[in-house]
Amino acid sequence: MTPATDRPNTPAPERFRPAPARPRLIATDLDGTLLRDDKTVSDRTVAALAAAERAGIEVFFVTGRPARWMDVVSAHVHGHGLAICANGAAVVDLHQGGLPVEVRPLATDRALAIVEALREAAPGTSFAVERSGGIFYEPRYPPFHLDPGAIVAPAEKLLHDGFAHADMPVLKLLAHHPELAPDDFLQLARSVAGAHGDFTRSSPSALLEVSGLGVSKASTLARCCAERGISAAEVVAFGDMPNDLEMLMWAGTSYAMANAHPDVLAATTHRTGANTEDGVAAVIERMLSR
């Protein structure tokens, strides 16, 4: 059974507030939220997004995905054409093929410090470096089927100033461990290397995503909203995993998908149906009918 929508999900009375009848901006995660499990956008969701834009509500896709993986939604962004990628490290123009509009990189010296700390604290960790022009990873790192042409080398080489693609800013450092529980790995990494970057996760495996200090979905979304004169109270956000937490807590109204991580369920003001049940579309349809 699909959980009832608009149901408060935390015992704090101050968070028991109704969703706005007509927000100015909708911010939604993609994987596990807007996209179905087969990574497609349903016809119902496409129609809901278009209806929101026609009603004057801006829609921002806010994702951990790189720009090159945004084809699945590029035809469904209207108006401004912008999307927030790589957990806030890049704002891209999907009308221009994912052209970067703003980049908030992770400094290579910080990334190297993180690599050193995790190699010592969690032996067996392997790394990948997501740069503005592509991903590069270590031999033991689980390869991405969408990136078959990536360069494979030790992280220290991939982050060296002499690396062939060193002119491309580092958007994210990724760290994978084959044995640790995902949340345990996240807690450990933050304790030993949190001074060098912002750590989060969105995968069911022990795969961490590291951005520059202060870089998150929330901080970049806040910047985009400020440019438009939109306050947090006028934003409705949707998400399902820990990398959505800051955004969901920043937005005036937040929805956790029924399939969300327990921390997301605990932090949000409302719940909606699962990503397989068009949970985002259901909320948008109800907002527009008021």
Image (spheres, rainbow, N blue to C red):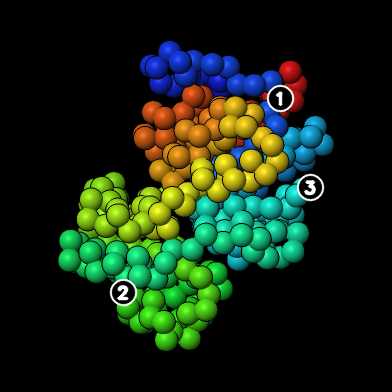
Residue at far right of view? 54
Q: In the shown orientation, is residue 256 left or right of residue 125?
A: right
Q: Amino acid at mark 2?
A: Arg
Q: Is residue 259 visible?
A: no
Distance Cα–Cα, label 1 vs label 2:
48 Å
Crowd around label 1: few <14 · some 14–19 · many ≥20 (10 Å): some
Q: Which residue is mark 1?
A: 22
Distance Cα–Cα, label 1 vs label 3:
18 Å
What kind of element bears circle 3?
Answer: loop
Judged by depth in the image, the label closer to the viewer, 3 or 2, is: 3
Q: In the shown orientation, is residue 188 left or right of residue 170?
A: left
Q: Is residue 288 above or below residue 102?
A: above
Q: Amino acid at mark 3?
A: Gly
What kind of element bears circle 1?
Answer: loop
Quadrant position of residue 53 = top right
- The residue shown at (51%, 18%) is 7
Q: Nearer the viewer, residue 208 or 88?
A: 88
Q: Which residue is mark 3?
A: 79
- The residue shown at (51%, 70%) is 169
Q: In the shown orientation, is residue 141 left or right of residue 219?
A: left
Q: In the shown orientation, is residue 247 left or right of residue 34?
A: left
- The residue shown at (42%, 58%) is 212
Judged by depth in the image, the label closer to the viewer, 1 or 2, is: 1
Quadrant position of residue 252 = top right
Residue 197, percent across and down? 36, 56
The quarter in which the C terminus is drawn is top right
Q: Which residue is mark 2?
A: 140
